[in-house]
Amino acid sequence: MARVVVDVMLKPEILDPQGKAVHGALNRLGFAGVNQVRQGKRFEIELDGDVDDARLSEVHAFAEQLLSNPVIEDYTVRVEGDARTGEAGLERAADGAER
Amino acid sequence: MKVGVVTFPGSLDDHDAMRAVRLAGGEPVSLWHGDRDLKGVDAVVLPGGFSYGDYLRVGAIARFAPVMTEVIEAADRGMPVLGICNGFQILCESHLLPGALVRNDRQRFVCRDQRLRIENSQTAWTSAYFPGQEVTLVIKNGEGGYVADDKTLDRLEGEGRVLARYLDVNPNGSLRDIAGVCNEKGNVVGLMPHPEHAVDELCGAGTDGLGFFSSVLPAAVAH
């Protein structure tokens, strides 16, 4: 089983009021030095079998047709290895260390 | 004259739209999002609300509802289609209209009476107005900011496809104060304010909205 991650972000020229609101909250909480916050969406998609070029172009097709609106958003696609290792695992470790 | 009004899960204004059709002298027909059937209607209204809970993006899931396949085909053949608020968002997601609607610039849901100018009174849905007529309708949206790239905006302006513009205050950050646009043929119209809430003196913002529904009756006959 393969995991594909699609990140969708508003294009830079589109105003992001949600990101602005988060940025304002960070300032109020006293986190200094934050220049800008942009909020997007992350889709974790599990596919049967391995990811070949054909499957990947399918992912691009639905990322463009459904997951994003090309008028206002850009998307990126990346393939992850086993979900128990790699980036996801590192994020959990970092969480634990902070607590 | 049959005017269909589509109900999606989360539609709010379908009954108001049907009432507006009736007050204008048409016969409202309820259409269901899950049916691939327009029940022989002559025009279609996509009403306001929060179809599919606004999940993913406003209008993004509704665009793939079975009934939309039929609406898109009918619109391409010239059938009058009006999208109000969430309906406008669905029409943009369906690529029947250019551009997109994004979250209001001031980050708040807006609900109040809004003055507009009807810029194009030659579409299927605005022929009852005179050019440049100023009207007051209700506006209520959280994601009503109309955006498109400059090239698209210039083309819309050049072709007279900016249907209506906000007056006094721009309520949501829409580029060039755009409140509504139409397609090339003028049969597909998207409007952020709600004409169906301005059809009765007793409640709402006067009767300025009735013209949208009376406009379409002869237009639908011609179609």
Image (cartoon, helix red, strand yellow):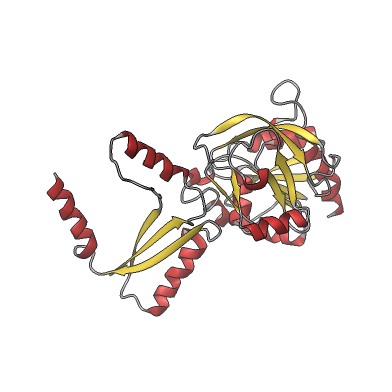
Name the quadrant containing residue A91.
bottom left
Residue B30 horizontal/vertical position (percent): 67, 43
Residue most toward the front? A33
Q: Is residue A23 above or below residue A12?
A: above
Q: Which quadrant does the C terminus of chain B fall into?
A: bottom right
Say if residue B151 shows up in the picture.
yes
Where on the picture, by quarter, is residue B111? Answer: top right
Q: Tell me the residue at 51%/54% (across/down).
A: A13
Which image quadrant: the N terminus of chain B?
Answer: top right
| Residue B20 shown left or right of residue A79 in the figure | right
**Residue A1 position in % (x across, y down):** 28, 70
- Numbered label tally: 0
Residue B41 appears in the figure: no
Q: Position of residue B216 (x, y in %)?
A: 80, 45
Q: Can you say whether B44 is above or below A64 in the image?
A: above
The residue at 87%/53% (across/down) is B222
User: Along the line of sight, which residue is nearer the eye, B94 or A95?
Assistant: A95
Pick the residue in front: B94 or A31. Answer: A31
Residue extending furthest bottom?
A53
Q: Is residue B21 left or right of residue B110?
A: right
Residue found 80% across the figure and 37% down from its top: B211
Residue B106 percent across, percent down from the top left = 52, 37
